[in-house]
Image (cartoon, rainbow, N blue to C red):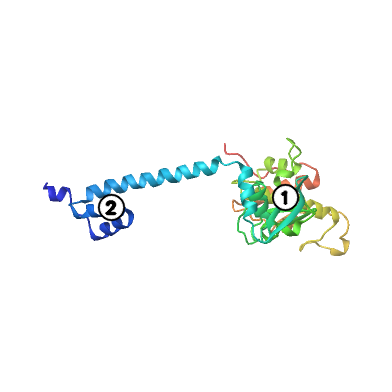
Amino acid sequence: MSEENQNPDLTDDEKRLFADLMPEDLKEIMDSGFNRRHFLKLMSIGGASVLAANLLGAEQVLARPLATEQAAATAAIENGVKLSFNINGASRSLTVDSRMTLLDTVRERLQLTGSKKGCDHGQCGACTVIIDGQRVLSCLTLAATCEGKKVTTIEGLANNNQLHPMQEAFIKHDGFQCGYCTPGQICSAVALLGEAKKGDASYVTSNIKQTGSAQQLSEDEIRERMSGNICRCGAYPNIVAAIMEVHSGKPVDQHFNFAG
């Protein structure tokens, strides 16, 4: 193989790229027989240098104290409002952008990442939390509207190491697969039981004249009341069984069988 084939000249595109990336004092190298082999070597070295610089920057960011990061975030807030509320039994005060959602606040400012951002349009229910006993979609709720209120996320349902009965029932009946929507499902189910206890009606309630007192829910009632929470894995029968068991206080047969 000839030397010309082993070391072909740079194409016009490669020359332009080299000229854009390299300092002025190196550009004249291109006019002194610089070939593609040299070009590829330098580009590889340059790429490795950029990667190393990025990794170093990431390491420096991760090494910063969390308090420093939070202080910087607070200083950069526009349209800030002071928010004081109770979150999972603890009083918290922080400054948030007046446009910030409750979901972003609990996840990004309070590091409570159990509540998930599924659709960010209030259609999937993965972000469901409980505010003053009522289930709400935190992706559609402004944090500023929660002033003085009591907010419960999935992290606040358990009592230390003792799981909430709804959490235990979900585990028993295998009410989740990927688990992404499960925090919202469980929060919604817990609030649902409170609604039934107060006698709130749903679309399928047979006699709304009898509402106002505690209701014994059927499976159809549970399905209707949970219809705002989507499970993309399709664990609906198991979710209904888990809620029914907690609601009735009686064991419910499991709807799944393990493979032999």
The quadrant holding residue 76 is bottom right
Question: Along the horizontal axis of the image, is 54 left or right of 194?
Answer: left
- Structural distance between the alpha carbons of marks 1 and 2: 64 Å
Work out whether residue 140 can be spotted. Answer: yes
Name the residue rendered at 36%, 47% in the picture: 47
Q: Does 86 sit above or below residue 160?
A: below
Q: Tag 1's secondary structure?
A: helix
Q: Nearer the viewer, residue 150 or 163?
A: 150
Residue 187 numbered mark, or none: 1
Q: Nearer the viewer, residue 179 or 42?
A: 42
Name the residue rendered at 74%, 44% in the picture: 156
Q: Nearer the viewer, residue 20 or 58?
A: 20
Q: Amino acid at mark 1?
A: Cys
Give the labeled residue for mark 2.
Answer: 25
Q: Nearer the viewer, residue 210 or 149?
A: 149
Instruction: Choose the circle earlier in sequence order: 1 or 2.
Output: 2
Image x and y of residue 127, in percent: 66, 54
Label 2: how many Cα within 10 Å (few below 14, some 14–19, many 20+) = few
Name the residue rendered at 79%, 42% in the picture: 250
Q: Nearer the viewer, mark 1 or mark 2?
A: 2
Question: Along the horizontal axis of the image, is 29 left or right of 161?
Answer: left
The quadrant holding residue 82 is bottom right
Q: Amino acid at mark 2?
A: Asp
Image x and y of residue 165, in percent: 76, 42
Image x and y of residue 256, in percent: 64, 43
Residue 6 numbered mark, or none: none
